[in-house]
Image (tube, rainbow, N blue to C red):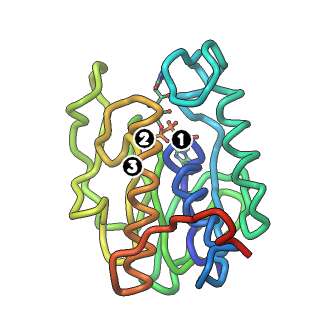
Amino acid sequence: MYDVAIIGGGPAGLSAALTLASTQGAKGWNPLHILVIDNQKSDLLKAELHNVPFLPKGISGKEALEKLSSQLLGYTNTQLTTDEVVKISGEKGSFCLEGAHQKYEAKYVIIATGAHGFSLQGTKAQAIPHTKMPREGMVALELQERNLIQEGIYAAGLLAGETTMFACASGSGVESACAILSDMQGKVTIIHDMPGSRA
Ligand SMILES: Cc1cc2nc3c(=O)[nH]c(=O)nc-3n(C[C@H](O)[C@H](O)[C@H](O)COP(=O)(O)OP(=O)(O)OC[C@H]3O[C@@H](n4cnc5c(N)ncnc54)[C@H](O)[C@@H]3O)c2cc1C
Protein backbone atom coordinates (compact mmCIF):
# COMPACT_ATOMS: atom_id res chain seq x y z
CA MET A 1 0.00 0.00 0.00
CA TYR A 2 1.48 3.36 -1.06
CA ASP A 3 0.86 6.43 1.06
CA VAL A 4 0.17 8.50 -2.06
CA ALA A 5 -0.35 7.40 -5.68
CA ILE A 6 -0.05 10.11 -8.29
CA ILE A 7 -1.67 9.62 -11.68
CA GLY A 8 0.25 11.63 -14.28
CA GLY A 9 3.98 12.23 -14.48
CA GLY A 10 4.14 15.70 -16.02
CA PRO A 11 5.42 18.77 -14.13
CA ALA A 12 2.42 18.71 -11.75
CA GLY A 13 2.59 15.04 -10.82
CA LEU A 14 6.37 14.90 -10.50
CA SER A 15 6.50 18.10 -8.42
CA ALA A 16 3.81 16.77 -6.09
CA ALA A 17 5.81 13.56 -5.76
CA LEU A 18 9.03 15.45 -5.02
CA THR A 19 7.45 17.31 -2.10
CA LEU A 20 5.93 14.13 -0.67
CA ALA A 21 9.10 12.09 -1.21
CA SER A 22 11.14 14.71 0.63
CA THR A 23 9.61 13.42 3.87
CA GLN A 24 12.47 10.90 3.57
CA GLY A 25 15.19 12.27 5.84
CA ALA A 26 13.10 15.22 7.05
CA LYS A 27 13.07 15.83 10.78
CA GLY A 28 10.02 14.35 12.52
CA TRP A 29 8.84 12.33 9.50
CA ASN A 30 8.65 8.66 8.68
CA PRO A 31 9.18 8.60 4.92
CA LEU A 32 6.00 8.42 2.87
CA HIS A 33 5.93 5.86 0.08
CA ILE A 34 5.05 7.43 -3.23
CA LEU A 35 4.09 6.00 -6.62
CA VAL A 36 3.82 7.96 -9.87
CA ILE A 37 1.89 6.24 -12.66
CA ASP A 38 2.24 7.82 -16.09
CA ASN A 39 1.35 6.91 -19.66
CA GLN A 40 4.08 9.06 -21.26
CA LYS A 41 1.98 11.67 -23.07
CA SER A 42 2.91 14.86 -21.23
CA ASP A 43 2.37 18.11 -23.15
CA LEU A 44 5.92 18.93 -22.16
CA LEU A 45 7.29 16.27 -24.52
CA LYS A 46 6.41 18.64 -27.42
CA ALA A 47 8.09 21.68 -25.88
CA GLU A 48 11.40 23.53 -26.01
CA LEU A 49 11.75 25.66 -22.88
CA HIS A 50 13.12 29.20 -22.61
CA ASN A 51 11.31 30.48 -19.53
CA VAL A 52 11.30 27.90 -16.74
CA PRO A 53 13.04 29.02 -13.54
CA PHE A 54 16.40 27.25 -12.97
CA LEU A 55 16.23 25.28 -16.25
CA PRO A 56 18.78 26.12 -18.96
CA LYS A 57 17.45 28.18 -21.89
CA GLY A 58 16.49 25.97 -24.84
CA ILE A 59 16.30 22.67 -22.93
CA SER A 60 13.83 20.21 -24.46
CA GLY A 61 10.72 19.37 -22.48
CA LYS A 62 11.76 15.71 -22.62
CA GLU A 63 15.09 16.51 -20.97
CA ALA A 64 13.34 18.68 -18.37
CA LEU A 65 11.08 15.77 -17.43
CA GLU A 66 14.08 13.44 -17.24
CA LYS A 67 15.88 15.86 -14.89
CA LEU A 68 12.83 16.14 -12.65
CA SER A 69 12.35 12.34 -12.62
CA SER A 70 15.98 11.81 -11.76
CA GLN A 71 15.77 14.37 -8.91
CA LEU A 72 12.70 12.55 -7.63
CA LEU A 73 14.34 9.12 -7.79
CA GLY A 74 17.10 10.44 -5.54
CA TYR A 75 14.54 9.55 -2.86
CA THR A 76 14.43 5.78 -2.51
CA ASN A 77 10.89 5.83 -1.10
CA THR A 78 9.56 6.69 -4.57
CA GLN A 79 8.66 4.66 -7.65
CA LEU A 80 7.76 5.65 -11.19
CA THR A 81 5.84 3.25 -13.39
CA THR A 82 4.41 3.32 -16.90
CA ASP A 83 0.73 2.46 -17.02
CA GLU A 84 -2.65 4.03 -17.77
CA VAL A 85 -5.06 4.26 -14.85
CA VAL A 86 -8.68 3.74 -15.88
CA LYS A 87 -10.58 3.53 -12.60
CA ILE A 88 -10.33 4.46 -8.92
CA SER A 89 -12.39 2.78 -6.22
CA GLY A 90 -12.40 2.74 -2.43
CA GLU A 91 -12.05 5.56 0.05
CA LYS A 92 -9.43 7.64 1.86
CA GLY A 93 -6.99 5.23 3.46
CA SER A 94 -7.66 2.39 1.02
CA PHE A 95 -8.00 3.38 -2.63
CA CYS A 96 -7.56 0.86 -5.43
CA LEU A 97 -6.34 2.17 -8.80
CA GLU A 98 -6.98 -0.02 -11.82
CA GLY A 99 -4.32 0.32 -14.47
CA ALA A 100 -4.24 -1.26 -17.91
CA HIS A 101 -1.40 -3.49 -16.64
CA GLN A 102 -2.02 -3.92 -12.91
CA LYS A 103 -3.77 -2.66 -9.77
CA TYR A 104 -2.28 -0.32 -7.17
CA GLU A 105 -3.33 0.50 -3.60
CA ALA A 106 -2.85 3.85 -1.92
CA LYS A 107 -4.11 5.87 1.03
CA TYR A 108 -4.33 9.16 -0.94
CA VAL A 109 -4.48 9.93 -4.68
CA ILE A 110 -3.44 12.94 -6.76
CA ILE A 111 -4.79 13.14 -10.31
CA ALA A 112 -2.50 15.22 -12.54
CA THR A 113 -3.48 13.97 -15.98
CA GLY A 114 -3.44 17.25 -17.91
CA ALA A 115 -6.23 19.09 -19.73
CA HIS A 116 -6.89 16.96 -22.81
CA GLY A 117 -9.90 15.21 -21.29
CA PHE A 118 -11.03 13.35 -18.21
CA SER A 119 -12.15 9.73 -18.56
CA LEU A 120 -11.05 8.22 -15.23
CA GLN A 121 -13.96 6.32 -13.73
CA GLY A 122 -14.98 6.04 -10.10
CA THR A 123 -14.55 9.57 -8.69
CA LYS A 124 -17.00 12.39 -8.02
CA ALA A 125 -14.96 14.69 -10.31
CA GLN A 126 -16.90 16.96 -12.67
CA ALA A 127 -15.08 18.12 -15.81
CA ILE A 128 -15.71 21.70 -16.96
CA PRO A 129 -14.17 23.78 -19.78
CA HIS A 130 -10.63 24.99 -19.01
CA THR A 131 -10.87 28.77 -19.11
CA LYS A 132 -7.14 29.65 -19.07
CA MET A 133 -5.97 27.78 -22.17
CA PRO A 134 -5.82 29.23 -25.67
CA ARG A 135 -7.13 25.99 -27.28
CA GLU A 136 -10.76 24.90 -27.48
CA GLY A 137 -11.91 21.65 -25.88
CA MET A 138 -9.51 21.55 -22.94
CA VAL A 139 -10.92 20.55 -19.54
CA ALA A 140 -10.38 21.18 -15.85
CA LEU A 141 -12.19 19.81 -12.80
CA GLU A 142 -14.55 21.54 -10.41
CA LEU A 143 -12.62 21.59 -7.16
CA GLN A 144 -12.98 22.40 -3.51
CA GLU A 145 -10.26 24.25 -1.54
CA ARG A 146 -6.65 23.17 -2.05
CA ASN A 147 -7.41 21.14 -5.21
CA LEU A 148 -9.63 18.68 -3.34
CA ILE A 149 -11.94 16.55 -5.51
CA GLN A 150 -13.33 14.39 -2.70
CA GLU A 151 -12.01 13.05 0.60
CA GLY A 152 -8.50 11.70 -0.09
CA ILE A 153 -8.40 12.58 -3.82
CA TYR A 154 -6.81 15.78 -5.13
CA ALA A 155 -6.23 17.22 -8.61
CA ALA A 156 -3.09 19.07 -9.74
CA GLY A 157 -1.70 21.01 -12.69
CA LEU A 158 -3.73 21.81 -15.79
CA LEU A 159 -6.48 19.46 -14.64
CA ALA A 160 -6.79 21.72 -11.58
CA GLY A 161 -7.41 24.67 -13.93
CA GLU A 162 -3.90 26.14 -13.87
CA THR A 163 -2.44 28.27 -16.65
CA THR A 164 -0.48 26.13 -19.06
CA MET A 165 3.04 27.01 -17.99
CA PHE A 166 5.53 24.60 -16.41
CA ALA A 167 5.92 26.62 -13.20
CA CYS A 168 2.15 26.99 -12.69
CA ALA A 169 1.57 23.24 -13.13
CA SER A 170 4.51 22.44 -10.90
CA GLY A 171 3.33 24.81 -8.13
CA SER A 172 -0.13 23.29 -8.26
CA GLY A 173 1.37 19.83 -7.70
CA VAL A 174 3.26 21.11 -4.66
CA GLU A 175 0.05 22.69 -3.34
CA SER A 176 -1.81 19.36 -3.57
CA ALA A 177 1.09 17.60 -1.86
CA CYS A 178 1.06 20.11 1.02
CA ALA A 179 -2.73 19.77 1.29
CA ILE A 180 -2.26 16.01 1.74
CA LEU A 181 0.54 16.46 4.30
CA SER A 182 -1.74 18.86 6.20
CA ASP A 183 -4.63 16.39 6.06
CA MET A 184 -2.38 13.61 7.36
CA GLN A 185 -1.12 15.75 10.24
CA GLY A 186 -4.44 17.44 11.07
CA LYS A 187 -2.75 20.86 10.93
CA VAL A 188 -1.16 23.16 8.36
CA THR A 189 2.03 21.38 7.27
CA ILE A 190 4.90 22.12 4.91
CA ILE A 191 8.39 20.61 4.58
CA HIS A 192 11.15 23.17 5.12
CA ASP A 193 14.77 22.42 5.89
CA MET A 194 17.69 24.31 7.31
CA PRO A 195 21.36 23.42 6.97
CA GLY A 196 22.04 20.33 9.07
CA SER A 197 18.37 19.58 9.75
CA ARG A 198 18.27 16.37 7.66
CA ALA A 199 19.12 12.92 8.92
C1 LIG B 1 4.13 22.70 -27.72
C2 LIG B 1 4.15 23.12 -26.26
C3 LIG B 1 5.10 24.02 -25.86
C4 LIG B 1 5.14 24.43 -24.52
N1 LIG B 1 6.07 25.34 -24.15
C5 LIG B 1 6.12 25.76 -22.85
C6 LIG B 1 7.09 26.71 -22.45
O1 LIG B 1 7.91 27.18 -23.26
N2 LIG B 1 7.10 27.10 -21.16
C7 LIG B 1 6.21 26.61 -20.24
O2 LIG B 1 6.30 27.00 -19.06
N3 LIG B 1 5.29 25.72 -20.59
C8 LIG B 1 5.21 25.28 -21.89
N4 LIG B 1 4.25 24.38 -22.27
C9 LIG B 1 3.22 23.99 -21.28
C10 LIG B 1 3.59 22.80 -20.40
O3 LIG B 1 4.02 21.71 -21.17
C11 LIG B 1 2.35 22.42 -19.58
O4 LIG B 1 1.85 23.54 -18.89
C12 LIG B 1 2.67 21.31 -18.57
O5 LIG B 1 3.19 20.19 -19.24
C13 LIG B 1 1.40 20.92 -17.81
O6 LIG B 1 1.75 20.00 -16.81
P1 LIG B 1 0.72 18.93 -16.21
O7 LIG B 1 1.53 18.07 -15.33
O8 LIG B 1 -0.48 19.61 -15.67
O9 LIG B 1 0.19 18.11 -17.48
P2 LIG B 1 1.03 17.19 -18.50
O10 LIG B 1 2.42 17.67 -18.64
O11 LIG B 1 0.22 17.09 -19.75
O12 LIG B 1 1.09 15.79 -17.78
C14 LIG B 1 -0.02 14.95 -17.63
C15 LIG B 1 0.52 13.53 -17.60
O13 LIG B 1 -0.54 12.64 -17.24
C16 LIG B 1 -0.43 11.47 -18.04
N5 LIG B 1 -1.74 10.81 -18.05
C17 LIG B 1 -2.91 11.26 -18.58
N6 LIG B 1 -3.90 10.38 -18.33
C18 LIG B 1 -3.33 9.35 -17.64
C19 LIG B 1 -3.85 8.13 -17.10
N7 LIG B 1 -5.15 7.81 -17.19
N8 LIG B 1 -3.00 7.28 -16.48
C20 LIG B 1 -1.68 7.59 -16.37
N9 LIG B 1 -1.14 8.75 -16.86
C21 LIG B 1 -1.97 9.60 -17.48
C22 LIG B 1 0.02 11.99 -19.40
O14 LIG B 1 0.62 10.98 -20.18
C23 LIG B 1 1.02 13.06 -18.97
O15 LIG B 1 2.33 12.51 -18.84
C24 LIG B 1 4.19 23.94 -23.59
C25 LIG B 1 3.24 22.99 -24.02
C26 LIG B 1 3.21 22.60 -25.34
C27 LIG B 1 2.16 21.62 -25.78
Q: Which of the labelled discs sits on residue 172, or is there none?
A: 3
Find residue 121 and report its horizontal and vertical position in percent.
42, 61
Q: Can you tell which mark lies on residue 11?
A: 1
Image location (x, y in percent) of residue 56 = 64, 21
Rounded to the nearest angstrom, the CA distance separating label 1 from label 2 is 6 Å
Residue 55 lies, in percent from the top left, at: 61, 27
For image coordinates 51% across by 26% down, the residue present is 52
Q: Separation of disc 3 and disc 2 at Cα?
A: 5 Å
Report whether the residue tagged 2 is closer than 8 Å to ligand 1. Answer: yes
Looking at the image, residue 163 sits to the left or right of residue 47; the answer is left
Q: Quadrant of residue 75?
A: bottom right
Label located before the other in sequence (1 or 3): 1
Looking at the rendered structure, which numbered label has been put on residue 119? none
Q: Is residue 67 above or below residue 123?
A: above
The local secondary structure at tag 1 comes to helix
Element carrying mark 3: helix
Q: Are marks 3 and 2 in contact (CB under 8 Å)?
A: yes
Q: Secondary structure at mark 2?
A: helix
- Mark 3 close to ligand 1, CB under 8 Å: yes
Q: Is residue 46 above or below residue 10?
A: above
